[in-house]
Image (cartoon, rainbow, N blue to C red):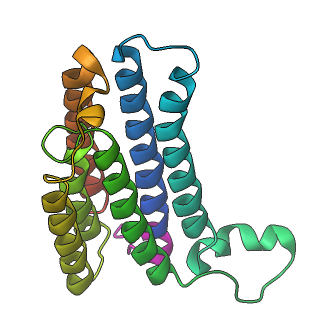
Amino acid sequence: MHEVIGPVNLVAAALITQLSLAAIVFLAVLVLQSGDLPVTVSQRPARSVGLHLVTLAAALITVGLLVFSDEYSTIWRPLFGTSSHSGVPWSWALFFVFLLNILWITVLVVTTGGSESSPFGPIYFLLPALAIFLREPLHRAGLYLLLIVVSFTLNFFIASDKGKARGGRRRPYAYWFVSVACFALATFVGYVTRPR
C-alpha cells in the first residue's frame, strides 16, 4: 500500500529531528563539561549552565512552533473540543524552526571556539540536508545555505581563545560525537522521508 506523505507527517518528522538535535547538543555539552579544567566553584556553574540554557530555550521554542502548527494541531485539537483553525501555518513553522536552528548553532559555535574548532560546526552542514529531506522549497533551502555559509565564515574570525579552551582534552570526543550523530540523523531522516 502506497501512503502519501502530507504536511502533518513532515511536521512530525521535523519534531523528531528537533528532539534528536537537542539531544545531540545536550550530550555534546556534557562531554565538553566533563573535559573542562577545574575552575573555582563560583565559575563552574555559570560556564556549565550557559550552553544548557541556550539548548533548552532553542528546543522549547522550536518544538513549540511545530507542536502548535496548524497541521499538527489537528492531532491534539479534538482533546480540547474545538474545531476552529489554530496555530501557525505549518510551512511557516518549519521556516522559523530552521532560522532559529541556524541562530542556535551560531551561538553554540561562537561560544565554543568558532568554526575552526567548535564541536558544533558539523551541525551547520546537517541543516540544509534536513531542509531538503523535510521537503522545504528550494528557495528556502538556498536561503538556509546562504545564512549558514555567512555564519560559518564569520565564525572563523570571531573565535575566542576562551571558547577554544572549553572541553579540554575531551573536545575531540565531543567533535567526533556530534559529527557521527549528525551523519546518523541525516541518514535516518533521509530514509524516513524518501519518496516511495
Q: Nearer the viewer, residue 92 or 76?
A: 92
Look at 48% across and 30% down and name the residue there: 47
- Single out the residue that lies furthest toward the top: 38
Whole-percent x and y of residue 20? 42, 44
Q: Is residue 8 magenta?
A: yes
Whole-percent x and y of residue 98? 37, 68
- Single out the residue that lies furthest toward the bottom: 84
Quick check: 135 above or below 104?
below
Q: How many marks?
A: 0
| Residue 196 seen | no
Look at 29% across and 74% down and name the residue there: 135
Whole-percent x and y of residue 148? 21, 65
Look at 70% across and 84% down and name the residue there: 86
Quick check: 133 above or below 157?
below
Q: Is residue 46 magenta?
A: no
Quarter of the image that includes the C terminus:
bottom left
Determine whether, in the image, residue 190 is placed left or right of residue 75: left
Look at 40% across and 77% down and name the residue there: 95
Q: Nearer the viewer, residue 173 or 6?
A: 173
Q: Quadrant of residue 161?
A: top left
Residue range corresponding to the magenta coloring = 1-10
Quick check: 65 above or below 107?
below
Determine whether, in the image, residue 52 is placed left or right of residue 75: left
Quarter of the image that includes the N terminus:
bottom left
Q: Nearer the viewer, residue 163 or 86?
A: 163
| Residue 75 seen | yes
* Secondary structure, magenta segment, majority class: loop
